Image (cartoon, rainbow, N blue to C red):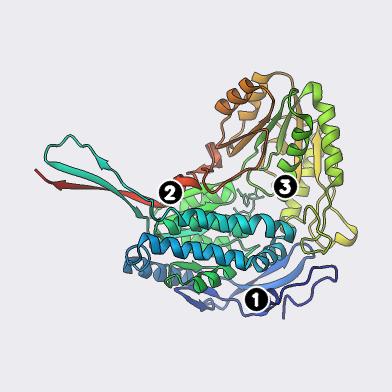
Amino acid sequence: MTGTNFPSNYVEILPEVRAFLQSDLKLHIGGRWLPPISGAAFETFDPSTGRLLAHAPSAQADDVDAAVRAARATFDSGAWHLKLTPSERGRLIWRLAELIEAHAPVLAQLDALDNGKPVTKAQNVDVPLSAEHFRYYAGWTTKIEGATIPVSTSGMFNYTVREPVGVCGLIVPWNYPLLMAAWKIAPALAAGNCIILKPAEQTPLSALYLARLFEEAGFPPGVFNVLTGYGETAGAALVAHPGVNKIGFTGSASVARTILRNSADTLKRVSLELGGKSPNIIFADADMEQAVVGATWAIFGNNGQSCTAGSRLYIQRSIFERVLTGMSDQAAKIRVGMGMQKDQPDLGPVVSQEQLSTVLGYIEDGRGSGGETVIGGQRIGGSLSNGYFIEPTIFTQVQDSMKIAREEIFGPVVCAMPFDDADDVLRRANETPYGLAAGLWTRDLQTAHRFAARMQAGTIWVNTWGDTDAASPFGGYKQSGHGREMGKEAIDLYSEVKSVWIRVG
Ligand code: NAI
Ligand code: MG
């Protein structure tokens, strides 16, 4: 029996959550709940306590095959993209958004328990943004248009239509379990695809719960399938399967490379949303208070476990000490605690023992190469010693060439580095294999536009950080990914264009 025993300082676990954790969790395939053929399961933990939460079914290649067949059968029957009108599809997606909102407390607790994030953050950020994402794409079902093309062949009428790609395997990470899934599912659905979702092995719960909401909304069986399991097994089998037309992936660059290799035999369409080492530049003329608070949360938001974390902080030399003092004061005030504790913290633990070791390893490496921690740098012990808690950490005395300044840490660790000259900082900011996001803080309009034009990243934030919207395209330059999610661009990402020629002359 799992998921029954929680610390006394936790908020009350909802009966639905308790029942879900104690239930026999199954894969969702073709509208049915099935145990994995092998019977294998894996454990998922509460990173705030290190305690076991639940056993989730561990899908293997044969389960992947069953899910692909189910999704294919539904796709080929046209039950989703042909037999329902665009308006009917839009209504179902909208209905799903409403159900996500209605079940927000449950989904928030599941993500808070599984990922460790404060439940209020899950409830006020992750879940509403997920619902909004479905709403936005519900509106797209009736607006996916082709064009009539003025071809120069006489007697020919040519037009285009956008059609779904087919069966999409969506592989998502653990940092925003529900939201990262929503980013992919919503446009894939709107474009008419059938879906197999593979959540991260660290956070399988909300994806399984979401499948219940798909059932309740009344989607045709087989439109949405969920396979929980490991990346190396379930994920890899999905990538290699000839019945899958497209893989949408968010995660590490190293797994992205493996996915590209493994998708080569079947020449699958692959879109990738990867990490970064995003530069955040503060000019001396910036609104100081805004910049200090903004740069603090650019890195420490979600514990640095964000693909867009502002992890390379460049500060103009004349204000370097001032910004550093301001950020240290801010960081010292951040309350770190268990995601489900009654007295809600600002930040929870990092997601796993593995992530804890990785982040602490980077901190050690930074110190070893001459970096100095002005604040933080330790694992948090005491009443939090069973969980994976790390102090918000600010490094100075960092060179651009150091490992902590080059590699994605994916934890609450920022490198603060001074700069003298605008051209020089622009060059340094762009000197990275990544290109997901970049930001600057300045009151100077010319600087703002010049940097927005010259920084090599898919998203530029000026006097702000971290904003995303379902309507605005998001994705990476360089090694931060292929393709753009959100906005109209995501409809393109999940559809094919067909060109039709008709002899009329
Ligand atoms: P990961 O890239 O291993 O995991 C992401 C997803 O890919 C998970 O669902 C996983 O099961 C799946 N996966 C793993 N191996 C696979 C394979 N061979 N074939 C198909 N799917 C596979 O990320 P991980 O190990 O959890 O975190 C490691 C680092 O990756 C982090 O420290 C961070 O730097 C980066 N990362 C970046 C994210 C982002 O939002 N861009 C999200 C998560 C991690
Ligand atoms: Mg991994």
The amino acid sitting under disc 3 is Gly
Mark number displayed over residue 20: 1
Q: Quadrant of the N terminus?
A: bottom right
The amino acid sitting under disc 1 is Phe
Q: CA distance from mark 2 to mark 3?
A: 28 Å
Report crowding for label 2: few under 14, some 14 to 19, many 20 or more residues within 10 A (C-alpha): many
Q: Earlier in the sequence, mark 2 or mark 1?
A: 1
SS state under label 2? helix
Mark number displayed over residue 493: 2
SS state under label 1? helix
Report crowding for label 3: few under 14, some 14 to 19, many 20 or more residues within 10 A (C-alpha): some
Q: Earlier in the sequence, mark 2 or mark 3?
A: 3
SS state under label 3? helix
Q: Position of residue 46 (x, y in %)?
A: 74, 66
Q: Quadrant of the C terminus?
A: top left
Q: Earlier in the sequence, mark 1 or mark 3?
A: 1
Q: Position of residue 472 (x, y in %)?
A: 53, 43
Q: Which residue is identified by label 3?
A: 301
Q: Is residue 241 visible?
A: no
Q: Compared with residue 32, is residue 224 higher up or lower down, i.e. above or below?
A: above
Q: CA distance from mark 1 to mark 3?
A: 29 Å
Q: Position of residue 162 (x, y in %)?
A: 33, 51
Q: CA distance from mark 2 to mark 1?
A: 34 Å
